[in-house]
Every structure is written in structure tokens, then in C-alpha cells.
Image: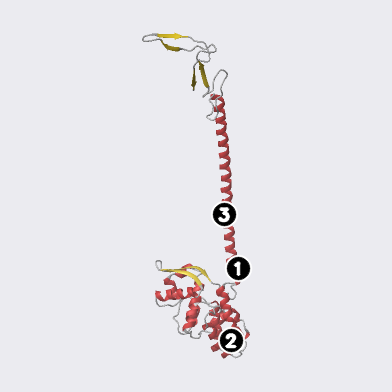
Amino acid sequence: MDPTQQKALNALESFILLSKSATSPRSAADLVNQATSAPNTYVFAELLQTPNIASLKTASPEHASYHALLEIFAWGIWADYSCMGPSVPFLKLCSPINSTSSTATPNLPPLSPAQSHKLRQLTLLSLSTSPSELTYTSLLNSLSLPTVRAVEDLVISTIYSGLLTAKLNTQTQRVDVSSVSPLRDLRPGSIPTLASTLGAWEARCTSVLDELENQIREVKQKALERRKRELRDEQAVQGLVADAKKNSGFKLADEKPKAGPGKRAAGQVIESTLGGDGNDEMDLDDGGPGKSRMAKRGGGNGGMKKVFKF
């Protein structure tokens, strides 16, 4: 349960207990005044159902008006009181509570400042369901407030009371409401309309969900087809590369050349022996100035060797 609603129910509990001892119409009417003036009391359906308060409806017109007043606090709005009240400026657009109370009690008891403030707060909660009613101009008329500043003060006090979450948009001159506490009681006979509204909302939600599921399926199908195309392209490229290697005769860079027969590997030591084992070496012998002699000497221990490395 919403914390604000639980707090309101707890605040009403003491008045429900007091209603058992309010056996006379006068005491019951006084209890209605106390309940509607007390802080934190925003729900009144349970109090309306108590026997002594319910009996006010069939009492004298003086006391029956308190029953009608409690009904307005339970599920009515400021315009309901304006249409029936004695001292509040009359508004052309009224939403009657029901035929019995509106005809039997043409006038209602005057409101105290605390009652007027609370009824305007409750009216703001009801108007929050219709964004078109939340402009400053509309609220000035609906709540019978004299200035824009008064509208803003009412909205701010309602926010700080935890009744709604909203922002004042001074640029567009409207109230942007994001959430409302469940504090309004249901008007008698409103269940079928509420059920119809919820049914239409459910149908819209189902339609939106079906559309989202269709879009998700389309996205998945397109992603699967794209992946298949990528795999086909990758396989085709690999096939072309394999054919190119087979037909071109070129070796890939990572293949090491193999040394054939009769070839020496790089870095192999080539040794030339001078004067030994049938290998001819050239020996320069200085025989004096201007003389030179080339001789072939046989191998021996005194032979010289030259080693070449590549």
C-alpha cells in the first residue's frame, strides 16, 4: 500500500471509532467537520459507511448537508461544492454527486480555511488525470483561486504533503504531473466505467506488445540472414585464395625453401685447402726484387688453408 494512503487511513481510524458514539445528528455533523478539517485525512469512504454518519443522509436538511459535504470530500471536486455552496463563486461547469444529494441539499455548510485548502488539494488530484486541466488558466477557474501565485502555492503544498509528484512549468504556464497518490474514493456507480477504461487500456497495451514482438522477430530474422551472407562470402573468399595458391605456383611467405641436392645451405662453411688432397693453391713466393714465382706445392702439414663463409 502507498505510504501516503496508509497514513491517511490511520488518521481516519480515530474518527471511525468516534462515529460509534455520535448517535445524534448534531454530533455526527460535528464529527464530519472534524474529520474534513483534520490534517492527513484524505479518504472518507469508510467513515461514510458507518451507521451514524450514513443516517445523516435522511436527517433534516440542515444535517443532511453535512453528509453531502463528506461525499464531496470523498470523491467530489471543488466545482461540486461551488455549485451547491452558499458563499463560493458559482462555476458554470458542475459535476453533480448524485441526484438525491444535489436536490435534497441545495446549500452546503461553509468551509473553514483548512477545509477549503484540503478540498482544493483533493480536486488537484482528480484533475491530474486530465493533462488539459492542468494549465494555470484552467486551474484558476477550477479551483476559484485569485492569482497564479495562489495556484503555485497550492501545487507546492500538495507536493510537500506527498499527495502528488509534479513540477511547475512557468514557461508553458502549466503543472507537469508525474505521479498521484491513490487517495480519492470511488464515486458510486463508477466501477463499470472504471472497468471499461481499464479494459481499453489493456487492449492498447496488448496491441503495443504484439507490435514490439513482431519488430523483434523481424530484427532477429534480418540478423540471421546477414550472418548467413557473411559466412557464404567468407567461404567464397577462402575458396578463391585456395585456387589462387594452387594455380599460381607461388609459395606463401611462411613456407621455407627446401635445399635441393647438390646445393649448399646458407651459412655452410666452404673450405679451400691450399696444397693438399689434390686441391691446387696459389702460393706467391717472393724471390727477390722484381721476381715472382708461382709454384704448386703438395699437401703437407705445412700447408695453409683459407676458409670462406657465406
Identified at 46% across, 70% down, the residue is 134
Which numbered dot is residue 195?
1
Structural crowding at the residue carrying mark 1, measured as other residues with C-alpha within 10 Å and reported as few (<14), some (14–19) or many (≥20): few
Circle 3 residue = 212
Q: Tag 2 or tag 1, which sits nearer the N-term?
A: 2
Task: Name the secondary structure under disc 3.
Answer: helix
Which numbered dot is residue 56?
2
Q: Are marks 1 and 3 in contact (CB under 8 Å)?
A: no
Identified at 56% across, 73% down, the residue is 3
Q: Position of residue 58 (x, y in %)?
A: 59, 86
Foreground disc of the pair 1, 3: 3
Viewer can see residue 234? yes
Residue sitting at the far left: 290
Q: Tag 3 or tag 1, which sits nearer the N-term?
A: 1
Q: Amino acid at mark 3?
A: Leu
Q: Position of residue 277 (x, y in %)?
A: 55, 12
